[in-house]
Amino acid sequence: MNHQGNIFLVVDLGAESGRIIACSFDGERFTQKETLRFPNNPVRSSEELQWDVDVLWGHIKNGLTRAAFDYGDSIVSIGVDTWGVDFGLFSNDMLLDNPFNYRDSRTDNVMESVFEVIPRSEIFKITGVQFLQFNTLYQLYSMVKAGDFVLDQAKHLLTIPDIFNFLLTGKKVTEFSNATTTQCYNPFEGKWAYPLLEKLGIPVDIFGAIVQPGTIIDSIKQDVTEETGIGLIPVIAPASHDTGSAVAAIPMTDRNAAYISSGTWSLMGVEVDEPNISDDAQKFNFTNEGGVDGTFRLLKNISGLWLIQECRRAWEKEGNPYTYRELTEMAEQSQDSGALIDPADGCFLSPENMPEAISQFCRDTEQAIPQSKGDIIHCVLRSLALEYRYVLNQLETLTGRELKTIHIVGGGSQNRLLNRFAADATGCLVLAGPMEATSLGNAMIQAVSMGLISSVMEGRSIINLSFPCERFEPQQNVEWEEMYESFLKLKQGN
């Protein structure tokens, strides 16, 4: 078949769904088309929550088969990106068990046990990573404490994108941006934090070679090409942590700009040249994740559209299958109870019923309880916007920059109500888009690696030309200032 432009295949796996996307580059602009979308449903056995690698690998191969039929020899390369922290353990070439889902309960209270061995401040000085109970470090230590035989048998640890790179190529490597999410990596020495791991009894020999974004890992294996019809194309490591690829695509030309990669999580930060391990960075619980071109992403994880996703899931179980657009329209028509929540509160990490958790939070904080579904969504979106302002103020303290612009990318950039709230709450110009920043950043790094684009900076300009941003000018008013004061009291109360 005849197609204009070079095709870069993107395997983009998220916590809710996965996609195979064909990104076409004609030398001036990117376009893209979804080849296959599939659900990513965790599997629960007994009390354990895990990811089903076999099912995901089957979906990926189906996507490759479709792409091979649609695009043939136009396909230049392929790159995989996913979420961070989760991992699989291998004995030689055999995956010993399905990777655990980061929301599994096995890491409950494990951080505190780790801090009894190594002080929190020491861990931060070594790794520069935000303290979250599901970080790889605490997942591994939970296995050490439990005497898990799988850890004893393991020869290799691979993060989620590295697992699929191995299935594609037969090569076991760990990509830099995902390595930095584990809290097992020392960014100052540029290698795994071996002394830290040894102190915790975590076997260090399971950690392998680290490669930088843009590295050609190898060509796709012969058996995969025979099964799918895909050519012997190179597998390139983009920034394989999805946020790393998303930030690579943001058309930032001003250092006084912040970004939010908005999806299940809202990851808010700035690009810096080296990790920030100041006392304030630790106090604010920021993280330093690897980026492209030798940069780091100084950012904070905010519990983003997960709150909306879980409300939607709960209502669907009740027989009300709303679309996200319908939920936003309901929020716009809300009578507004005036209630706010703290999105960072632990009660929202993995509740059985999100709407009930929101109501209970309001009850516990002596606020009016949102009555309608629209009221609940309105409360969540407004609270997220106020959380953005809270984190923006911390970023300004950490960097000494006056941040005037916020780039919002990812699926959440389509939520115009949240974008408007974000502009009004922060007083910043909000530039929304591109929505598909992760896949575009992934494809752009592939194009740079293959020599079709000269640099990341040029790639960002091409993406901006291909997918212009939508502007949201701030309309500050007294109401938002009063809401922020109430929001701060909520956070101080927690």
Image: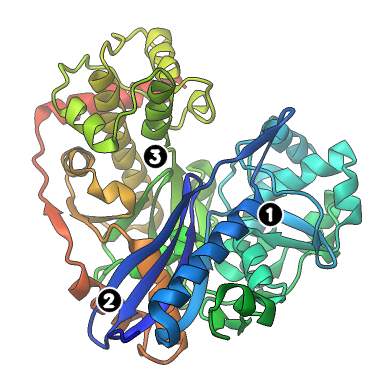
Q: Please state the horizontal and vertical placement of residue 402, each as a whole percent of the image.
A: 25, 56
| Residue 304 visible to an observer of this rendering | yes
- Which residue lies under the disc numbered 3? 304
Determine the secondary structure under disc 1.
Answer: strand
- Quadrant where the N terminus is found in the figure: bottom left
Q: Please state the horizontal and vertical placement of residue 110, each as a whole percent of the image.
A: 73, 35
Give the numbered dot on residue 233. none
Looking at the image, which is closer to me, 88 or 303? 88
Looking at the image, which is closer to me, 215 or 399? 215
Which sits earlier in the primary sequence, circle 2 or circle 1?
2
Q: Is residue 159 above or below residue 113?
A: below
Looking at the image, which is closer to me, 415 or 10? 10
Q: Residue at x 69, y 73 (%)?
A: 173
Q: Callout 2: 10 Å neighbours few (<14), some, many (20+)?
A: many
Determine the secondary structure under disc 2.
Answer: strand
- Which residue lies under the disc numbered 2? 30
Q: Residue at x 60, y 37 (%)?
A: 103
Q: Callout 3: 10 Å neighbours few (<14), some, many (20+)?
A: many
- Which residue lies under the disc numbered 1? 87
Q: Amino acid at mark 3?
A: Gly
Looking at the image, which is closer to me, 479 or 456? 456
Q: Nearer the viewer, mark 1 or mark 3?
A: 1
Which sits earlier in the primary sequence, circle 1 or circle 3?
1
Q: Amino acid at mark 2?
A: Phe
Q: Is residue 221 above or below residue 484?
A: below
